[in-house]
Amino acid sequence: MALTRRYGSVPAMPTAGKAAGLAALFVAGLLAAATLAVGGFAADTTTTETTTATETSTTTEPATTVVTTATVEQTTTRKVVLPPPTTATTETTSGESGGTPTWVWVLLGVLAAALIAVIVVLATRGRGGAMAPEDRRRLLDGAVNSWVVQGWAIENRSADSAVLRRGNELMLLGVDAAGHVSTRPLDPGYGPPPGA
């Protein structure tokens, strides 16, 4: 897999990486849409009821009074499952039903993921305009230096191109307005006429 370079030594993202990122965004959008569509919250609620009964009986006999008090306490616990929370609905004038269908939420999630993907792709693309001359010169300097280290000598140089020589071989290096560095071999007969 070859990486293209833009603006000097910063490698561009490979196409496979872009596709994987786009697929991940798409899946995340689908999961978010499905989660919103399912809705429904279940909660466990414990209700405790306490019943207290007091029974008092009084017996009166000559010279003896007996008071008896008994308290009975009973606790009942039951599990209550609550339905999903509902929002307050206004009266519908057309024949609409009360809820939004699941497919609408899924479609909205897919569209949101696609919008995010388009924004990311547009943001990572080049600006489309011409590079500043000093940036182009810097790119050319870097490219020329990498060839010089390999044994090439500078034969001729301009603001956006250079001719390099190694023995009888000639190489033309150029930087276009978008910042792409290109190299191509030249015919050995290239150059000014002898004696000029």
Image (cartoon, rainbow, N blue to C red):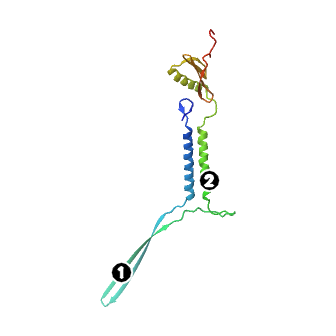
Q: Which residue is mark 1?
A: 69
Q: Amino acid at mark 1?
A: Thr
Instruction: Please give the name of the residue rendered at 48% of the width and 68% of the height, measured from the top-left corner.
Output: 80
Residue 15 in which image quadrant: top right
Q: Report the front residue among 194 and 113.
A: 194
The image shows residue 128, relative to residue 54, as above or below, that is above
Q: Under tag 1, what secondary structure? A: strand
Q: Residue lying furthest top in this view?
A: 195
The image shows residue 170, relative to residue 11, as above or below, that is above
Q: What label sits on residue 8 in the rendered view?
A: none
Left or right: residue 12 compared with residue 56: right
The image shows residue 136, relative to residue 71, as above or below, that is above
The image shows residue 25, relative to residue 52, as above or below, that is above
Q: Residue lying furthest left in this view?
A: 63
Q: Report the front residue among 74 and 161.
A: 161
| Residue 188 coordinates in the image, percent (x, y) | 60, 17
Q: Which residue is mark 2?
A: 107
Spatial separation of the CA atoms under disc 1 and disc 2? 69 Å
Q: Work out whether mark 1 precedes mark 2 in sequence or the reverse, and give the earlier one.
A: 1
| Residue 41 coordinates in the image, percent (x, y) | 52, 61
Q: Amino acid at mark 2?
A: Leu
Viewer-nearest of discs 1 and 2: 2
Residue 169 in which image quadrant: top right
Label 2 Cα crowd, 10 Å radius (few <14 / some 14-19 / many 20+): some
Instruction: Please give the name of the residue rendered at 59% of the width and 48% of the height, measured from the top-left corner.
Output: 113
Q: Under tag 2, what secondary structure? A: helix
